[in-house]
Amino acid sequence: MKRLVDSTTGSHGNVQPTGCSDPGFSRTVIQWQKKHGRHGLPWQQSKDPYRVWLSEIMLQQTQVATVIPYYHRFLVSFPDVHSCALASSEQIMAHWSGLGYYTRARNLHACAKRVVSDYGGVFPSEPEKLQALPGIGRSTAAAIAAFSYGARAAIMDGNVKRVFARVFGIDGYPSSKPVEDRLWQQAAALLPETGHAAIQAYTQGLMDLGATVCTRTTPRCDVCPLTKRCVALASGRVDELPVRKPRKSTPTRQVIMLLLVDSTRCVLLEKRPPVGIWGGLYSLPELAWEDGKTAQQLHKKIRKAAQPYADVDGVVPLEKVSHGFSHFTLAIHPYQCTLKREGHLVSEDSHVWYPLHQIRNAPLPAPIKKLLERCDSVS
């Protein structure tokens, strides 16, 4: 029989209200991290706030294995906050292409500029000042301050929420405000009182436990150092906690995208608005999809839309591409257009004819880059 839990437990038999300090908890996490935690990640090899900040921004909603090559490439081109601040938005976006959640890249660039202009290129050590910078939330500010300066500040990312929800038996969806407030209260109360090294090991240990042991599916409870105090394990609720977000149906948006390739093997790219999906990146020109249109009507619509940029000779539909976002699915209907002659001159601010053989280096969303690479290989 399931046991409903509305409190936190220091061990199977000792129930405590949420927010109580428990020095044994942090000691256990620190000892485990020193012996079993991750120590070889590239951003762990330096306490340079710039490198710590870069890794924390890239790791938001993105797995470590995906981030590592992007992190290395970014540092080759922008080794410090000054070079990052001086880069063009196109250069930053090109290095972020494929990593997703592009608002992070725009905020990262704005943050670098602020650190240079307001702090002389030195990241502040106070979490409150870090949190005031673009793209840095409460948990990210705490992580940067802890790893760079040894500041005593609590983190609360998805991994930590999962650990706390299970260990302390915290019901409710973790991102709802009442539950999140409770989790933050717990996180602040459990911070170790000791020095910089302990704070850093504790912070990293929480992340490591959530990422490698207390995972969303098939958690490794047999090797977890917190089993003796885990409410979810004691009550048979490991699979139920944390409570998952209520499911909603995912809508689908449909668009037409035009592949205008001229005789010099250049494709027309259009810069997207600075906000919204793929904001600030280049993509293919888009048209609204209309159900019920005949092929002849579609081709006429495409020719008319392309007229300012190229004289279209033929229109060939390509295989539909679907790309999932967090709140909807984008269904792309690509149409490759053959041109009567070389493309017209365009404004460099909003449109550009880009060589297909260099498309890998273009600041494009990943699905568009893959579509164009496939187009180049078969043409």
Image (spheres, rainbow, N blue to C red):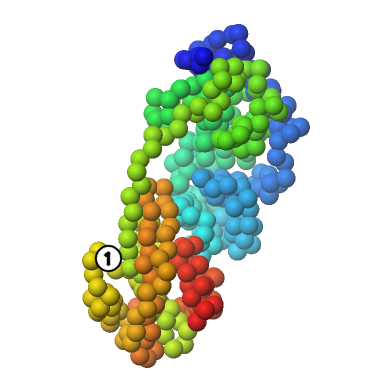
The residue at the point 65 percent across, 47 percent down is: 43
Residue lying at 59% horizontally and 52% vertically, measured from the top left = 67
State left or right for residue 190 relative to residue 257: right
Please state which of residues 82 and 376 is positioned toward the viewer in this rendering: 376
Give above or below for 10 relative to 76.
Answer: above
Residue sitting at x 46%, y 22%: 171
- Mark 1: give few (<14), some (14-19) or many (20+) Cα within 10 Å: few
**Residue 258: x, y in percent?**
36, 74
In the picture shown, does residue 39 fall above or below 221?
below
Q: Residue furthest right?
A: 35
Residue 99, given in percent of the width and then of the height, sits at 52, 56
- Across and down, in percent, residue 30 comes to 69, 27
SS type, badge 1: strand
User: In the orientation shown, which residue stands out farthest toward the bottom?
Assistant: 341
Q: Say above or below: 125 vs 182.
A: below
Residue 363 left/right relative to 221: left
| Residue shown at the point (25%, 64%) measured from the top left | 291
Total of numbered circles in the picture?
1
- Residue 268 % position (x, y): 40, 77
Q: Which residue is mark 1?
A: 288
For this rendering, which residue is in front, 120 or 149? 149
Q: Quadrant of residue 208?
A: top right
Q: Is residue 75 visible?
A: no
Q: Can residue 78 be spotted in the picture?
A: yes
| Dot 1 amino acid type | Ala
